[in-house]
Amino acid sequence: MAEKSRAIWEKLQGSRSIALLDPGSPEECLRAYRLLDPLGIVLEIACRREHALPGIEAVLQAHPGALLLAGTVLTREQAEGAVALGVAGVVSPDYLPGVVEACVEADVMCVPGGMADCGKQLVFKAERYRCTLEELRRDRPWQWVYKIFPATADEGSLGRSVAAWKGVYPGIRFLYTGGVTPRHVGRLARQDPEGIFCGSALAHHLDDP
């Protein structure tokens, strides 16, 4: 599974863009993927409704090489289900040890989120891989990442936290989501020129792209 995680990480270095979709049907996932993939935009399918896992399955059956993220993953069971279907990575709104552990066991990219647990999740990953933090950063850069959520909370405080984490964990990359819109993304990108940005705005208006 690490091959898919490596591939999606490389893809994200290009567009630095993720479209978050809360699907109303599996067909909507297919439509979104077919629209976004040629643009280099990664599709994250939110596991908020019953259509998410069937949607992931539909995309991967039609496009076996698709690189998808499962988002809003809250439980180990959800993580294991998404990984079994073949996602390239799992994204959570918080640092949830069971989710991280399931992903490490499968060697799949895991991006926990929040405003405070950047270091905790990196150390937890390294412990589960039985490696040092430096080895984690060097050998699995797709695990050397943290999700800033919500990205538009207190931007002054947020900027200071990001700068501090970068000082302690060299090379750490941040995925910004939660309130990321065309109005905010330019400011966030100037604040963090290496940031990766996720927004539902990229998955809106699929019938009129």
Image: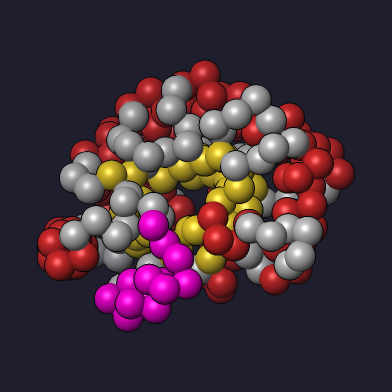
Q: Residue at x 22, y 48 (%)?
A: 115
**Coloration of the structure image:** secondary structure
Front residue of this view, candidates 66 and 154: 154
Quadrant (top left/top right/bottom left/bottom right) for the N terminus: top right
Q: Is residue 63 left or right of residue 198?
A: right
Q: Is residue 86 left or right of residue 189?
A: right
Horizontal and vertical percent for residue 102? 46, 26
- Quarter of the image for residue 122 reads top left
Which range of residues does the magenta coloring cover? 179-191
- Would you say the magenta stretch is mainly helix, strand or loop? helix
Outermost residue, right side: 62
Outermost residue, top side: 77
Q: Is residue 112 left or right of residue 50?
A: left
- Quarter of the image for residue 113 reads top left
Horizontal and vertical percent for residue 22? 60, 42
Q: Is residue 122 visible?
A: no
Quadrant (top left/top right/bottom left/bottom right) for the C terminus: bottom right
Q: Residue at x 46, y 42 (%)?
A: 91
